Image (cartoon, rainbow, N blue to C red):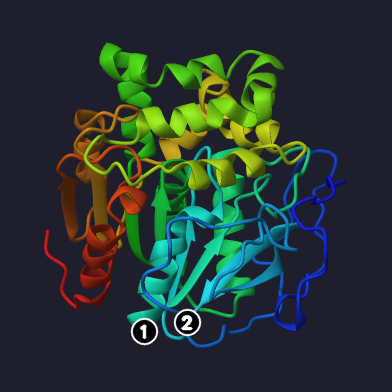
């Protein structure tokens, strides 16, 4: 059974009606990839520059924040996923990282829509407005969530844009379902095999990712994340952001992420993927996943990274190109930290859109 979504206190408007609630079986097995949802398009795109402060929480609660986008739910892979969408054109699916949710892509939603794309930001399983299921937080199943959403949106494929954990899952989806991934963009996350080797053999990266090791304790990390109205979330975001852009994070943005983490069960579901990544290292399922990820990525790939990222070291991410047998472009943002899409939204969006529109992306 699923844990009820507590992200919204009032019903969504006509264009955002909730789809059927999905369920995951008690043994944790996911349903068919891409369970049908109601495809739809959003209205006209909004302004390209939104204010950085979100203002007070509206009737949609801490997740369905107001803006030019449309909120609705789609069913995929045995669960229900909240999305925010804007614009018309080729689908670009945006995947958030930890400790955030879809709202992290607010700047890119408007920029992509203005550039002629259908921009969709989804909440990953267990986060934001999506279902909180008891199981299903391994990367293979989470990748099937993503490809299932693509099908539920009625699209033949999508350009995947993933940050942090969303980037890890984007790498995975591009390997598992290459026909559904038109292009791949990853920010602040190495290829899964590169992440694994760096965490195990590079002391500096292991120390930088110490929060991942801390997540392996039972119960304690969940309590720490929500203590004092999720004060730890604000501290992590501030510590991981680079010093070049004092505009991010501001107090209003941090409060948005803190409120979202305080939704019941979100803290537990947010760290379950990290628990799997470590606890499966010596298990058959983890070994099988690592072996599966030997398959090369065969879609054009853009890899973005902040030069001052304290959570994922540049050296760890930079070696990911060896797993790509397609045009691969590495872009390092000087002076930025772990959140380049929020620290420098104009620069990030320009780089992203120019690459997506490039018919012959270079290596």
x, y percentage for residue 36? 71, 73
Residue 363, percent from left and from top: 12, 58
User: In the rendered image, which quarter is residue 249 located in?
Assistant: top left
Q: Please, is residue 169 above or below residue 116 in the view?
A: above
- Compared across the picture, whether 321 is left or right of 158 comes to left
Q: Residue tagged by mark 2?
A: 87
Task: State the residue at coordinates (36%, 31%).
Answer: 240
* Total marks placed: 2
Image marks 1 and 2: residues in contact by CB distance under 8 Å? yes
SS label for mark 2: loop
- Pointer 2: residues within 10 angstroms few (<14), some, or many (20+)? many
Left/right placement of residue 111 relative to residue 69 reads left
The residue sitting at 25% across, 35% down in the picture is: 243
Residue 300 visible: no
**261 or 142, nearer to the observer:** 261
Check residue 217 in the rendering and tell me which mark sits there, or answer none: none
Q: Which mark is residue 116?
A: 1
Q: Is residue 205 visible?
A: yes
Q: Relative to the observer, which residue lies in front, 282 or 148?
A: 148
């Amino acid at each position: 059974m699923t844990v009820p979504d507590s992200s919204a206190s009032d019903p969504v408007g006509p264009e955002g009606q909730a789809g059927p609630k999905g369920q995951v079986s008690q043994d944790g097995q996911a349903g068919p990839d891409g369970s049908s949802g109601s495809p739809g398009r959003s209205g006209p795109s909004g302004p390209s520059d939104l204010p950085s402060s979100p203002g007070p929480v509206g009737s949609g609660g801490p997740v369905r924040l107001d803006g030019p986008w449309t909120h609705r739910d789609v069913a995929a892979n045995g669960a229900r996923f909240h999305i925010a969408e804007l614009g018309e054109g080729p689908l670009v699916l945006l995947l958030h990282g930890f400790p955030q949710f879809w709202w992290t892509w607010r700047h890119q939603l408007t920029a992509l829509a203005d550039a002629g794309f259908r921009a969709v930001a989804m909440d990953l399983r267990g986060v934001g407005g999506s279902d909180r299921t008891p199981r299903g937080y391994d990367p293979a199943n989470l990748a099937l969530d993503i490809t299932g959403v693509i099908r539920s949106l009625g699209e033949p494929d999508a350009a995947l844009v993933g940050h942090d954990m969303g980037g890890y899952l984007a790498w995975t989806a591009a390997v598992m379902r290459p026909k559904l991934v038109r292009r791949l963009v990853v920010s602040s996350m190495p290829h899964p095999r590169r992440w694994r080797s760096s965490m195990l053999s590079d002391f500096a990266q292991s120390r930088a990712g110490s929060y991942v090791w801390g997540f392996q304790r039972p119960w304690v990390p969940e309590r720490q994340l929500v203590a004092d109205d999720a004060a730890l979330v604000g501290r992590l975001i501030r510590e991981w952001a680079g010093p070049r852009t004092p505009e991010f994070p501001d107090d209003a943005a941090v409060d948005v992420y803190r409120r979202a983490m305080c939704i019941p069960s979100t803290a537990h579901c947010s760290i379950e993927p990290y628990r799997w990544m470590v606890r499966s290292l010596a298990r058959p399922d983890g070994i099988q996943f690592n072996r599966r990820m030997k398959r090369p990525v065969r879609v054009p790939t853009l890899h973005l990274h902040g030069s001052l990222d304290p959570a994922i070291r540049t050296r760890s991410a930079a070696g990911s190109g060896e797993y790509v047998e397609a045009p691969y472009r590495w872009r390092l943002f000087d002076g930025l930290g772990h959140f380049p899409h929020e620290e420098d939204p104009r620069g990030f969006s320009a780089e992203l859109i120019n690459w997506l529109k490039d018919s012959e992306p270079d290596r």
